[in-house]
Image (tube, grey):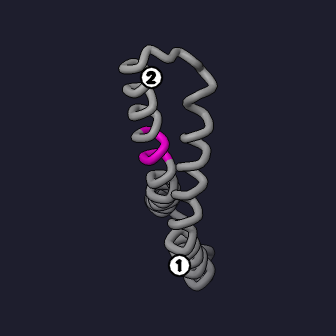
Amino acid sequence: MTPEFVIGFARQSIELTLMIALPMLGIGLIVGVLVSIIQAATQIQEMTLTFVPKIISIFLALLFSFPWIMDKLVTFTRELFLNLPNYVG
């Protein structure tokens, strides 16, 4: 195992992690900003009001993107296990 391989593998792992987390983080950000704008417009300053819409939207994003996430994870894991003899040897 060369240092270049380890760096490349770590880069692929981090890219996959960020790509998988992006739908939930993006939707949580958008919903949080929208709820904050509504709170500012209506002058409702309840701190707990932002949690319920964000939790529901992130759960729905996870629910709808779960097949895509699993496909990416299975593909990455399959490639890792298939090329494992090349990596070790």
Residue at x-position 44% and y-position 57% = 19
Of 4 and 29, the residue lying toward us: 29
Residue at x-position 52% and y-position 57% = 61
Give above or below for 76 relative to 26. Answer: below
Residue occupying the far front of the picture: 42
Of 55 and 74, the residue lying toward us: 55
- Asked which secondary structure carries label 1, the reply is helix
Q: Say whether residue 26 is left or right of residue 45.
A: left
Horizontal and vertical percent for residue 42?
41, 19
**What is the three-letter code of the residue carrying label 2?**
Gln
Residue bounds of the magenta highlight:
25-29
- How many C-alpha atoms fall within 10 Å of the one at disc 2: few (<14), some, or many (≥20)? some
Location of the N terminus by quadrant is bottom right
Residue at x-position 55% and y-position 30% = 50
Give above or below for 87 relative to 54. Answer: below
Q: CA distance from mark 2 to mark 1?
A: 43 Å
Q: Residue 84 is drawn in which quadrant?
A: bottom right
Query: Chief secondary structure of the magenta span?
Result: helix
Q: Is residue 89 visible?
A: no
Q: Which mark is residue 75?
A: 1
Q: Is residue 45 visible?
A: yes
Which numbered disc, 2 or 1, marks the residue closer to the eye? Answer: 2
Q: Which residue is mark 2?
A: 39
Horizontal and vertical percent for residue 34?
39, 34
Residue at x-position 60% and y-position 54% = 59
Of 60 and 66, the residue lying toward us: 60
Give above or below for 59 relative to 81. Answer: above
